[in-house]
Amino acid sequence: MTARASEGPATSANEIWTATLQELANKLRREQLQTWFLRVAPVSFDGQSFVLAVPSEFHRNWILESYNAAILNSLKGVLGYTVGLQLIIDPERAALSNISVPEQTVVIPAAPRNHAPAARELPPVVAPPQLSLNPNYTFENFVVGPCNRFAFAGAMGVAENPSKAYNPLFLHGSVGLGKTHLLQGICGELLKRRPKTRILYLSCETFTNHFIGALEKGALEEFRRRYRSTDVLVVDDIHFLANKERTQEEFFHTFNAVFQEDKQIVLSSDSPAQEIPTLQDRLISRFKWGLEAEIEKPCLETRLAILQRKARTMNVQISDEIARFLAERITHNIRELEGAINRVVGFAGLERESITLDLVHRAMPELLKEQTTVVRFDDLASIVAKKYHIKIQDLQSRRRHQSIAFPRQVAMYLSRKYTKHSLEEIGAYFGGRDHTTVMYSIDKLEGLLKENNQIRETVDALVDEIGRSFPRNN
Ligand code: ADP
Ligand code: MG
């Protein structure tokens, strides 16, 4: 990690971060800088990836969601090329940052370091943060597929008809699948349609912190007034209520007050309400009053569409082969999928090369390692047989009827991809054929996959199912 960082003062992480903060100061408001960048410390820079320490997971997510692009752009401005950004959670290190946030938001060429220690204040206790939305998290940028269609429709319904369509809207799904994106999409769309809408959008963690702060300061009245005088209340990651009895109690009253005023409530969670540990029954039942929609893991086709969309917004071209290479390996988390393409594009910029499969291998060597998912013949054959409504014994037979010969070719192709067996072994398993027959079958199928959409869709679905049934252990 430190190879180039130690080359000299001009490239040290500290120097770079100081200059980057100056750049950021031109783009962000002073409060934003104070709130989010004071307790952030540079850790290392290896020429490709810049590592920062931040105090908490919440801080990390907030920076990633709101300031990722600004930081990357500023780093690029400082370094002259695109690099990756990694945020590690290390409160101690973050607290020890000796780099102060620039005082003024004006351009100071070759800015001297500002030694005045800046006030290390927490964000204000009672007032929730100003609505700050990630400009990329819009409905237009959201790729809709079978995994999220229902949730997307719910979100659209709410944005079009707040308090009328579904109340509350409760979205759940595991991490990195687009919950925050949809929540912010709703806020953006609401504001587009009715700019005067009062929206309170915040994470459940912020709600909790405000509540505790208000309790300590004896400012509950003000807290309640603030939270209850809104047209739309959007609370992200409501599973954070787990094991927080007092905050649950307060949220219960907030929910009731807002709901009774006929105002819209939107919530997201990483699990269904009834699976949030210790969540009170009365909250569980309220969360189900409106529409509950799950966001599932995206299928291969959706992952491919997301990659291509992301590449377009980054103004780069990636071939189908490369999109597939990534999408077949990163199956569970869209944030990771985006991270992969960022990394590949950053790496290409750094190496001044075009994006080839070889470059992808070098940029993400761990993906190659993960390819060693090994599926057993029997498991693979059973998935293929089921898809084509035939028996495993048919696949293993010498029968040549098209209804069997074709699925057999598919099975051979997938065996080459997902088992460690040689062509000879594959041939032996599928009806005692020799390796040239296997090679011919695989070639033929690869040709068909290029030409025939329907076949490609079926094989994609199989690849997807294998990926889900036998996840790589990462
Ligand atoms: P969650 O809140 O569920 O953990 P996020 O909303 O933060 O997930 O999504 C993670 C990343 O993936 C974000 O950058 C988001 O824009 C992107 N993303 C998720 N789903 C989609 C989608 N359907 N289309 C495009 N981008 C998506
Ligand atoms: Mg989220």
Image (cartoon, grey):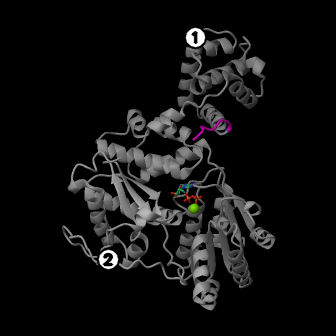
Three-letter amino acid code at the position of disc 1:
His
Residue positioned 55% across, 67% down in the render: 184
Q: Is mark 2 within 8 Å of ligand 2?
A: no
Residue positioned 51% across, 37% down in the render: 324
Q: Where on the picture, by quarter, is residue 183?
A: bottom right
Q: Is residue 226 left or right of residue 90?
A: right
Residue positioned 44% across, 57% down in the render: 87
Q: Where on the picture, by quarter, is residue 166?
A: bottom right
Q: Dot 1 corresponds to which residue? A: 435
In the rendered image, the vertical position of residue 392 relative to residue 337, given as above or below = above
- Image location of residue 89, percent across then percent down: 48, 59
Look at the image and give the residue range highlighted in magenta: 469-474
Using the rendered image of the protein, determine whether residue 39 is visible from the camera's viewpoint. Answer: yes
Quick one: SS at disc 1? helix
What predominant SS class does the magenta segment belong to?
loop
Between 313 and 211, the one lying in front of the other is 211
Q: Residue furthest left?
A: 110
Three-letter amino acid code at the position of disc 2:
Pro
Between 395 and 92, the one lying in front of the other is 92
- Image location of residue 113, percent across then percent down: 24, 70
In the rendered image, the vertical position of residue 423 relative to residue 302, given as above or below = above
Q: Is residue 311 left or right of residue 240?
A: left
Q: Circle 2: is it few (<14), some (14-19), or many (20+) Cα within 10 Å?
A: few
Pick whichever of labels 1 and 2 is earlier in the sequence. 2
Q: Where on the picture, by quarter, is residue 433?
A: top right
Q: Is residue 153 left or right of residue 49?
A: right
In the rendered image, the vertical position of residue 39 relative to residue 415, given as above or below = below
Q: Dot 2 corresponds to which residue? A: 117
Q: Is residue 396 magenta?
A: no
Dividing the image into 4 quarters, which one contains the C terminus?
top right
In the rendered image, the vertical position of residue 197 relative to residue 88, given as above or below = below
Between 27 and 264, the one lying in front of the other is 27
